[in-house]
Amino acid sequence: MNGRRRVTEADLKLTERMISESYVGLKRAAVQAPERAAEVAVGKVKEHPLIALALVAGAGVAGFGILKWALSCSRGEKKRESGSKLMDVLIGLLPMALPHLIGLLEQILGGEGRSRR
């Protein structure tokens, strides 16, 4: 270790104090993060209530379809309903549509609308 000064007790205490202050700031940020995120989300929903309603309704329909499909598979049901074919198509299209939906949400919520490809 040529050219380096020795680490002193004061250096160690300073480092410990800086780590402690950083940890306090991290804890504060972690506690405040959900509240800040909720404030942003509520503000955006108030600005665009119809789009938020449509997204929630679409997510609910997709969630219901996935749950119904998963339950029918777990029971081993072979009988297919006419509506389940449509749900199979929608579930199949979901992975392709998801990046576009995320981009739309980012644009609405003030993001840059980056593509997740």
Image (cartoon, grey):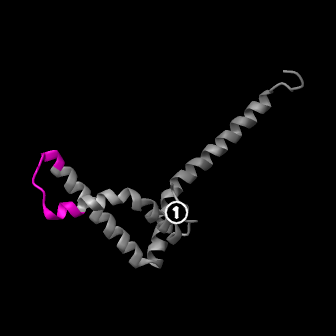
Count all numbered tags in the image, as a single digit: 1
Give the side of residue 3 with respect to residue 74, left or right. Answer: right
Task: Say which amino acid is labelled 1.
Answer: Arg
Q: Residue at x 65, y 41 (%)?
A: 20
Which residue is the site of mark 1?
36
Comparing 14 with 93, the one in front is 93
Magenta-drawn segment: 73-86
Judge whether 109 appears above or below 75 on screen. below
Q: Residue at x 47, y 67 (%)?
A: 105
List x then y, in percent, for residue 32.
53, 57
Give the side of residue 42 with respect to residue 88, left or right. Answer: right
Q: Residue at x 57, y 52 (%)?
A: 28
Judge whether 42 appears above or below 81 on screen. below
List x then y, in percent, for residue 14.
75, 37
- Classed neighbour count for the residue bearing mark 1: other residues with Cα under 10 Å, few (<14), some (14–19), many (≥20): few
Comparing 39 with 77, the one in front is 77
Q: Residue at x 29, y 62 (%)?
A: 90
Give the side of residue 108 with respect to residue 16, left or right. Answer: left
List x then y, in percent, for residue 7.
80, 26
State yes or no: residue 10 in magenta.
no
Q: Secondary structure at mark 1?
A: helix
List x then y, in percent, for residue 84.
19, 60
Give the side of residue 85 with respect to residue 45, left or right. Answer: left
In the rendered image, the residue lying farthest to the top is 1
- Quarter of the picture holding the N terminus: top right
| Residue 50: quarter of image | bottom left
